[in-house]
Amino acid sequence: METAVSAYVAANPRSKELAARAARHLPGGITRGTVFFEPFPPTIVRGQGCFIDDVDGNRRIDLLNNYTSLILGHADPRVLDAIHAAASSGTAFAAPTEYERRLAEIVCQRVPSVELIRFCNSGTEATMQAIRTARAFTGRDMLAMFEGGYHGTHDHVSAPGIGIPKAVADLVVKLPFNDAAGTERILAAHRDRLAAVIVEPIMGAAGMIPAEREFLAMLRELTRHHGILLIFDEVMVFRVHPNGAQGHYGVAPDLTTFGKIVGGGLPVAAFGGRSDVMSIHDPHHEGISFGGTFNGHPVGLAAGIATLEALTPDVLERLNELGAYTRERLAAAFAETACGFQVTGAGSLFNVHATSEPVRDPQGARRGDPVRLRTLVLSLMNAGFYLAPRGLGCLSTPMTREHIDSLVAAARSIVTAMGAPPATG
């Protein structure tokens, strides 16, 4: 680890200086916790296609793409043209625009379970409003989510935690992912108070862990039986199929949240679902009054329209094939070197784990060696590849097999030098 840190510091003197200056006014020198890592993150000056450049002149293949939101890569001409056209007519209005109708139409056509939709500005807002919608519709107050799940940063999906009242935490129950018996038992115990179960069909922050098909089907059946609304958080995983992760699994939830690619890289998110549930937001009737100065921001919606129109089934199929190729090649390299790493994911998403054991739930991911994982990720950054500190990676449409082959070659070299993991037990 020390060698990787020393090499990184030596190659990034300007980023180090700017990180220190930023810390005078920003806690920790950043305004977004997920982009921080030791010793300091690089300061980026531009992105083009699948590459990003930092202030020290380092160019890297961007395998993070603003945490999966830039599926077309950086500065895609179609998205830039849409942004410029929308902005030239005005940046925001206290009135509807054609952009919100068009993007709503696109999403509802692609995702059959979404009959009505509302736009907001972040995945956090989307899950917050979806949960409130479920509570208002059912008249119940409790929420169930899965251990290790991430659904933004509002209180109900962050509980328990520092700064969150116990009264809020008491309204949240945790379920075991990919554990049918455990989930069934907990849902039955709280069935009369549960308004909703929220789940990522593929757990992102927990380690890009896919739900087992039988598990999601069981969850759909159980929630329907108990009158509990099922919310799919597709903020990150909408990209895995033309109809979203629910299309990939063939399971239709009651509500769905969107973000990331739905705004084409700009701050746009959404929540939607069954018309009888979403009608609680109809201003013609008494219900939830959900405002927001920048909801339906035309520039962001224009970027989202351009992005989704570019993501035809053929384009997504090619990208998902490249994702499968990435996972297969990395898994083969890890197996051949006996280095104690695994890879998980789906579609164009992947995550590396510093463990020899298969990862099927968040507990399995947490059993990995954090020092070995940090060493691999930082060493890959030194070699010209940008991933999340937790080992998350994603692909963008400008990428080719040649880019992936170079990643695999670098990873193979690094883990070979690291050697086998220390013996345990």
Image (tube, rainbow, N blue to C red):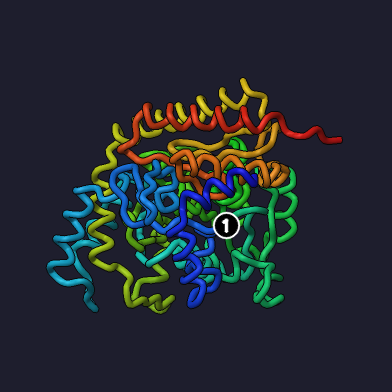
Compared with 172, 81 (above or below) is above
Image location of residue 321, percent across then percent down: 40, 28
Which residue sits at x=55%, y=28%? Answer: 413
Q: Nearer the viewer, residue 291 or 93?
A: 93
* Residue 133 shows up from this direction: no
Image location of residue 382, percent across then percent down: 49, 43
Compared with 194, 250 (above or below) is above
Give the amino acid at mark 1: Pro
Image location of residue 293, percent across then percent down: 33, 77
Residue marked by disc 1 = 39
Which residue sits at x=50%, y=52%? Answer: 232
Circle count: 1
Q: Quadrant of the C terminus?
A: top right
Q: Quadrant of the N terminus?
A: top right
Which residue sits at x=64%, y=47%? Answer: 2
Left or right: where 358 falls relative to 204: right
